[in-house]
Image (tube, grey):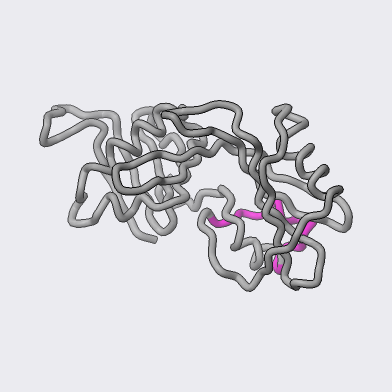
Amino acid sequence: MRNCEYALPGLLRYAQQIRRCGAAMLLSCVLPASAAQDGSFSVALGRQDRLQIEQLACGAQYGLALADADGRAFDARSPAQFAEVRCRPHTQIGGQPMYYVAQCARDSQRWQCSPAELETVVRLPQRDVVIRPGSVNPQKAVDTLRKVAGYGYFQGMSVDKALQSVCNMGMGDRPELIELSCQRWSVTVSYWCPKPSANNPCPRVIYMHER
C-alpha cells in the first residue's frame, strides 16, 4: 500500500475529477484523500436534493438520518454538482462520536454516492485528528494513532507533523501492519515488535514518506 494513493474521499479536489470524468463517471474515478482549494463554490442544497442524498448515503443501508451535506458547484449561480455528506452519529468511540461520511455527485437530476466510510475524531493532548479507520478495527485505529502521535521523530521526521486530518487508515500487506495516509504523508505502523521496551515501544513506526 505504500506506493498507492488511497482512493478515499476529499471534497474539494472533486473539481479536477469532475472536469475530466463528468458527473456520471465521478464516483468511479480515483479521488485524492486531501482537500484543496479548487475554485468551487459553496451552494445550498434544496430539500429534494437533501432527501435523495440522505437516502442514498445514510438511510438505505444504515437507517440513519443526514447530519450535514456540503454542496459545491463550479459556478456560484448553478445548482450543487457534488457534496460531502455526514450522517448522524450512531455510536461513540473514545468519548467521540462515530459517523459515516460519503461523497455524492449529481448527474442531471439524479445523485450518486460513494460507499459510506466510518469517521471519528481522535483527541490528542494538543489537538484533534480526524480519522477514517477503513479496514482497521475502529478501536485499534484510535489506539494506534494515539500511541504513535507521541513518538516524536522517525529517522529525523516528525511523526506528529505527519498526522494531520484527515488520516485514512487501512490494513497493510501483512496482518501486523497498519497504513496511514494523512494529507501528504504515508506512514506504516507495525505491531510486530521483537524487543519492545520503554525506548522501543510497540507498535512502532517502520516507514514514513512525504509525497
Total number of numbered labels?
Answer: 0
Q: Does the magenta stretch include residue 29?
A: yes
Q: Is the magenta stretch mostly helix, strand or loop?
A: helix
Q: Position of residue 16 (x, y in %)?
A: 64, 67
Q: Which residue is drawn at 24% across and 37% down?
A: 204
Displayed quadrant of residue 59: top right
Residue 205 placement (x, y as % from top left): 26, 42
Q: Is residue 139 above or below residue 185?
A: above
Name the residue furthest right.
109
Horizontal arrangement in the rendering, residue 14 relative to residue 175 (left or right): right
Residue 147 in the magenta stretch? The answer is: no
Q: Give the range drawn in magenta.
A: 19-32
Q: Is 6 left, or right, of 56 in this rendering?
A: left
Would you identify the image quadrant in which residue 190 lies? top left
Q: Residue at x 60, y 28 (%)?
A: 90
Closest to the observer, 135 or 88 = 88
- Relative to 33, 155 lies left or right: left
Of 113 and 129, the residue lying toward us: 129
Q: Which of 155 and 53 is in front in this view?
A: 53
Q: Is residue 204 above or below residue 21?
A: above
Taking the image as shown, residue 92 lies to the left or right of residue 195, namely: right
